[in-house]
Structure formats: C-alpha cells, structure tokens
Amino acid sequence: MDAQMKRGFLDACVLATLLPGESYGYQIIKDAPPSLGLSESTLYPLLKRLETRGLIRVRKAEHNGRLRKYYSLTPEGNNAVREFLEDQAEVLSLYRFIQQAALNSAKAAKGSPADSDCAPAGQPDGAPPPDGTSSPQPAEPDSGPAFEKGAAPRVATVTATDPSSSLV
C-alpha cells in the first residue's frame, strides 16, 4: 500500500484498537494490523496528537513497579471512528465500481461466450464446450446505484488474474 494511503488509515486504526477498551502503547502496536507497520516512533507522537484533539484520554498507573500510560477513547474518538467508517463506505463503493468495470472489460477483451451474444466458432448457440465441461456463468454485478443490471461500465482493458485480488 502506498505510504500516503497508509497515513490516511493510521489514526483510524489506532483508534480502532481502543474500541474494545483501554490499552497501552506496546499492546496497541500488537493489536494494529501488521500491514500498517506501526512502530513506537510513529505511535507515541500519534497518541499525543489524538489526545490533543480530544479523541483519546490518558491515565497513568503503576505496573510492575513502572509507570505506564493507558489510553482510552473519548466520545469524540468513538465519533471519529464512526465518521471514518461512513467515509470509507463511499470509497469502497467506488472501488467496487472500478473493480467490476475492469473485470467486465477483461471478460469482453477475452471474448468470453458468457458475455457475448454469439457462441464460439464451430459451436451451436448454447452447446457445451467440446471437452464436456460446462461454461462458467458470469458473476452478477454488485447491486447498488453504480451497477444497474445490464449496463457494463466502459473502461480501458486491463488484465485481471484473480477476481478476488486487487488489480495491478
């Protein structure tokens, strides 16, 4: 993932680690997604910024003879997580549109019989392939405002290796 994109998720991921309840720095790093690459040098300044913004509160308590800081969400922090999820739902909808358009385009470029009105050369309409297997049926596009049934988006052709993987 692009470093700039990760930065956009950093605050939300740290706040999300606090949703179950109070935690401390080392545990937050362990609870954060490994792909985030969260380190102490990133976490502690971030926690200070989140505290300054009123999204978390800090309490100090002794643990094994040492002073430890415990972090918890404020109501504003809970709201920030909710707002992040609402914003990302819109982004996810756009991602799905792009992914579906690319998959439709890749299928059309391959001349998939399931996506065209004509059968492959040498086969009558609706006949199974000569190897005896059945042709895979195309997946229905996602529902929602971006995907009206029967309307394939027009995009440049891309090669998709696995529909469940991200596009390259």
Image (tube, helix red, strand yellow):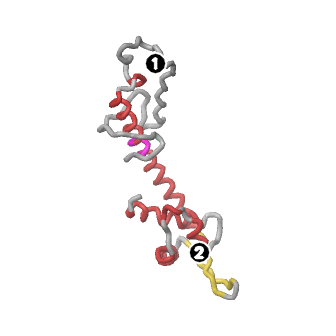
Q: How many marks?
A: 2
Taking the spot 55% from the left edge, 66% from the top edge, the residue there is 15
Taking the spot 40% from the left edge, 36% from the top edge, the residue there is 103
Residue 159 location, quadrant? top left
Answer with left or right where residue 129 lies relative to residue 73: left
Residue 62, compared with residue 153, is above or below; it is: below
Residue 90, compared with residue 45, is above or below; it is: above
Residue 132, compared with residue 9, is above or below; it is: above
Residue furthest toward the top? Answer: 124
**Amino acid at circle 2:** Tyr
SS assignment for the magenta stretch, majority? helix
Taking the spot 42% from the left edge, 23% from the top edge, the residue there is 114
Residue furthest toward the front? Answer: 131
Q: Which residue is mark 2?
A: 26
Answer with left or right where residue 39 lies relative to residue 75: left
Please give the range of residues in magenta. Answer: 94-98
Answer with left or right where residue 121 lies relative to residue 64: left
Residue furthest toward the left? Answer: 156
The residue carrying pointer 2 sits among few (fewer than 14), some (14 to 19) or many (20 or more) residues within 10 Å by Cα, namely few
The residue carrying pointer 1 sits among few (fewer than 14), some (14 to 19) or many (20 or more) residues within 10 Å by Cα, namely some
**Amino acid at circle 1:** Pro
The answer to whether mark 2 and mark 1 are in CB contact below 8 A is no
The quadrant of the rendering that contains the N terminus is bottom left
Q: Which residue is mark 1?
A: 129
- As helix, strand or loop, the secondary structure at mark 1 comes to loop
User: In front here: 130 or 41?
Assistant: 130
